[in-house]
Amino acid sequence: MMYSDIPSAQTLVLYFKSRGVKNIVISPGSRNAPLTISFTKNSFFKCFSIVDERCAAFFAMGMAQHLQEPVAVLCSSGSAMLNFYPAVAEAYYSDVSLIVVSADRPSYRIDIGDGQTIRQENVLQKHIGYSANLKQDIAHATGTISKYGKSLLEQSQEEIQEHNEAEISKALSVAFDEKYPVHINIPFEEPLYGKVKEPSVKIQDLDKDFMEDSLNEENWEELAKVWQKSSRKMVLVGVNQPNAIEAEVLEALVKDPNTLLFTETTSNLHHPEFFESIDSIIAPIEKSENREEFFKTLQPDLLVTFGGLIVSKKIKAFLREYKPKQHWHVDIKKANDTFYCLTKHIRTTPNHFFKEVVSSEIEPLSDFKIFWERKKDSYEAKRDAYLKEIPFSDFTAFDEIIKKIPKGYQVHLANSSTVRYAQLFPMDSSLKVFCNRGTSGIDGTTSTAVGSSIYSKVPTLLLTGDLSFFYDSNALWNKYIRPDFRIVLINNSGGGIFRILPGKEDTEEFETFFETSHELSAKHLADMYGFEHISAENEVELEDRLKEFYSKSNQPKILEVATPRVLNNKILLGYFDFIS
């Protein structure tokens, strides 16, 4: 093993090792050489080289999301770190423990006209749990410091070491215990490439007492009474980790005769009695002559939410207008007042909450659940009928693609049209679904899927749209993509979702500045990055290509599905008319 001869670099590496931060994603550079040397020369760490910093950060975030443990991403000084910001924001709103480590120039090099220098301290502070700004060692490059940074000598090396250890320890505690991204900024002076076989510093023994269980001491008897008395209950589930909810909890909810359980594709919850296509329930009501009556019939007395952000705009609009009498959000960490009617934040796990409040006793039966189950059966039958009537399009392609995903796969959904189409079709309960819904951006979705796939015990499928794919094409620029990695790319020649939003025009300006129409293909990217490229332009070709797409191979595969740009929006909007 080798270490940098710079104390702060040694300190960070020793703290990471003591807390079990094993995975380090490195964007190559020079200023971060002391850290790169220390991590790559130590067999405890698994290091990954990703050139594009934005891709690197999303790659690390995907890995952290999959492992449910902190992963570090490391870069050089200057604008490099700013490219981490989109992933940092996503990690912040998705509760992912991403550790950002940025090498910095000495303070006396900042704002004097030196290259690759920006004000790095606290630059990410709006979207992280903690900013650890380390101090520059004065035991290294002492002659240069004496010449240009005499003020740094006002503190001793021992005081600097104490400060740096406290900052690193605090950052790691936030990352582990609070599941927030954190930022550690470390200034280094040249020379940067010195090495030693043994560290010159010895870190303090860490207090490994993690954050105490912060479960609220709730009055469970009172909460259970409210639950029992509510004849119209709605449980709405957003982004949720696979296998997070116990089977007995799900069964108890199913047996409750007065509860509708609305789930999204990202919830990873499945049951024949759950309402898995929320928009297919809401859209017909919006178009009904009895809109007001139906919405009041659906309006819950008690709304219970858990999980992350909700995809469906329709359910958000409905609950904001037809507010429940009470809205409880169940989450240890935070509660978003998404519908502007939050009455209680219950700081516990969903499993614990439902075990406390859901009774096995038979409740007085209302027609709330029975009525909406009939509506659900109706739209499911009409969806099948509609699919038989329409031509090849995004709608038919998603139906076919989702049906053919092999059992047990890990599935990553890109944002925008992709995740919204996926909401309309049932997914097999064995699939593990992920999507970057923290900020809901299209940037980094491919990189996230690649990072998540690294330690997955099952193959990974990325289901993506064309703009998301081309925007993050540097995600394929690494040597870590597994042969069983699969991408299904829906190429409708532009941002098709804008054709269903207000403001749509059939003009050149609309196509250029909103829809971003194009004639790009993934073929050349696939060739460049060593992917097998397969294409389909109609229903027969899609069915045929899917037969072999998931077969074992020596290289990853892209299936590019071309759909009609100007027809897709009409078919999607026609679906909601048809089921209404």
Image (cartoon, grey):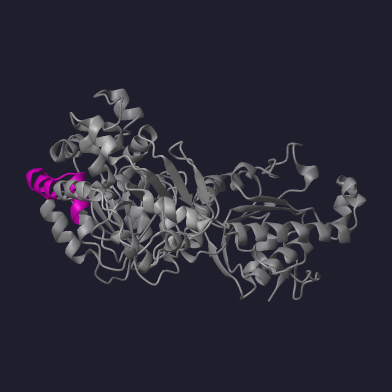
Which residue range is magenta in the image? 381-400
Q: Nearer the viewer, residue 513 or 264?
A: 264
Figure quadrant of residue 321: top left
Residue at the spot x=80%, y=43% of the render?
108
348 or 403, nearer to the observer: 348
How far across and down, in percent of the image, does residue 137 sit?
Answer: 82, 57
Q: How many marks?
A: 0
Q: Is residue 140 above or below residue 407?
A: above
Position of 165 compared to 376: left or right?
Answer: right
The answer to whether residue 404 is seen in the rendering is yes
* Residue 51 seen by the camera: no
Left or right: residue 154 compared with residue 469: right
> Does the stretch in magenta take in 383?
yes
Quadrant assignment for the C terminus: top left
Across and down, in percent, residue 36 comes to: 64, 63
Closest to the observer, 155 or 292: 292
Q: Residue 226: where, in percent of width, then height?
A: 42, 50
Residue 446 position in % (x across, y down): 40, 53
* Relative vertical location of residue 205 with respect to residue 259 in this rendering, above or below: below
Image quadrant occupied by the N terminus = bottom right
Q: Main secondary structure of the magenta part?
A: helix
- Please tell me which residue is depicted at 61% across the width and 61% down the height of the picture: 177
Single out the residue that lies furthest toward the front: 364
Q: Residue furthest left?
A: 389
As for residue 8 lying within the magenta part, the answer is: no
Say above or below: 78 vs 285.
below
Q: Residue at x 33, y 36 (%)?
A: 318
Is residue 236 or residue 208 the one in the foreground? 236
